[in-house]
Image (spheres, rainbow, N blue to C red):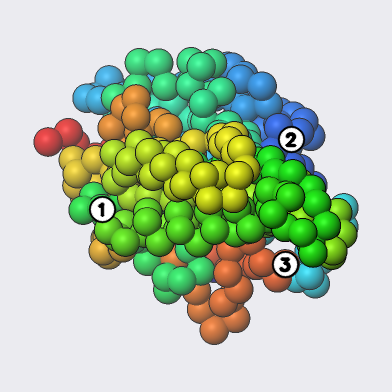
Amino acid sequence: MNDSFIGDELFDYAVSMRRKLHACPELSGKEFVTSAIIRSELESMGYAVKTAHTGLFTDVRGRGYGAKLAFRADFDALPVRENTGLPFAADCGNMHACGHDAHTAMLLTVAKYFVSHPPAHDVRLIFQFGEEGEGGALTMIEGGAIEGIDEIYAFHLCPEADKGVFATTADCALFAGVMEFDVCVKGRTSHCASPENGADAIASAMRFATEAKLAVEKCGGALMHTGKISGGSARNVVAGEALLECSFRYTVKDRLESARGIFKDVLAECDARYGTQSGVRVKTIYPPLVNDASCVARLSRAVKISPSGGRFTAEDFAFYLEKVKGCMCWLGIRDEKHTAPLHSDNFDFDEGVLALGAEAFVKLADTEDL
């Protein structure tokens, strides 16, 4: 059902693109077919397309009013086997289980709308790869995607908010920052009956997992999780090595450095206690996603905004916000039929929200500067 002003023809286009993209989900950094589809659509509309790896961006000339805006959609999928039963469901073992097919379909619809309805502002449309990987946003930035941009905006489907509700905030981090890291512990093997001859890497690793979590979480606004512990060779042998795979999440930027200091101190204490030698290997770091208040205000002039709290999930849109001011906003999809969470194998939504998201982008492009 189309409840927006974009018209039935454009709504049908949004639905068709969503289904086409949904049927060919590709993992982060490998979105070659998806990228080719987006490029073909944009070029058929007359847009000149620039690339950054598999990501793409293009400019829409407006009527020369005010700030230059950027709208971003992501288009990578997840390694989830689909279980929706949809006639256009993917059968390759991957799935658009986070709504990125919807994000891209909405932005393509906006591009199509702007062909015959130029916006007030100049607008850059950014189609980003690798949001689920290790920060595709950084490659887009390095490739010039936000050069000359004053403000950037994005929507993300939200199964916890009622269908059609737009929710965001500038009062706290909408998404947390994250540091994914491994802790490598080296010990010394011995028979478990003579533990004094060994250095127990597993015992040291387990103590770090417990003590570091307590230390970094006691002040609030942070979370540490150890998702995997591996090590040792046999039940009756003191482990000579262990590996922890950890995630630290934080809502205030300066908490990262303080946490890294805590991790260093706790590791030193564990090594001293158990005779081990340990080190931290950082895999990736995302900053917290904090919206700009003036951009939330612009969005509120385009659509009705409901307040939203923050989450400990991470989003690489935060990298754009370190360079230019902007706003990410949830778009609710929850109804009686659609309650599955993001990243689940039966995630789906009423396609009517495609029109609502596209309409919100269009309205943003016509809002006046304060």
Quick check: 21 left or right of 327?
right
Q: Quadrant of residue 81?
A: bottom right
- Camera-nearest residue between 361 and 253: 253
Give the total number of marks visible in the rendering.
3
Numbered badge on residue 172? 1
Where 133 falls versus 173 (above or below)?
above
Residue 99 shows in the view: no
Q: Which residue, given by chain and number where applicable, does mark 3 sit on?
A: 345
Distance from the alpha carbon under mark 3 to that under mark 2? 20 Å
Q: Do tag 1 and tag 3 residues touch (Cβ < 8 Å)? A: no
Indicate the amino acid at tag 3: Asp
Q: Amino acid at mark 2?
A: Glu
| Residue found at the far bottom of this picture | 336
Few, some or many residues within 10 Å of mark 3 (<14, 14–19, 20+): many
Q: How far is the residue under mark 1 from the one under mark 3?
A: 30 Å
Front label number (1 vs 3)? 1
| Kind of residue at badge 1 | Cys
Residue 128, image x, y percentages: 57, 33
* Within-10-Å neighbours for mark 1: few <14, some 14–19, many 20+: some
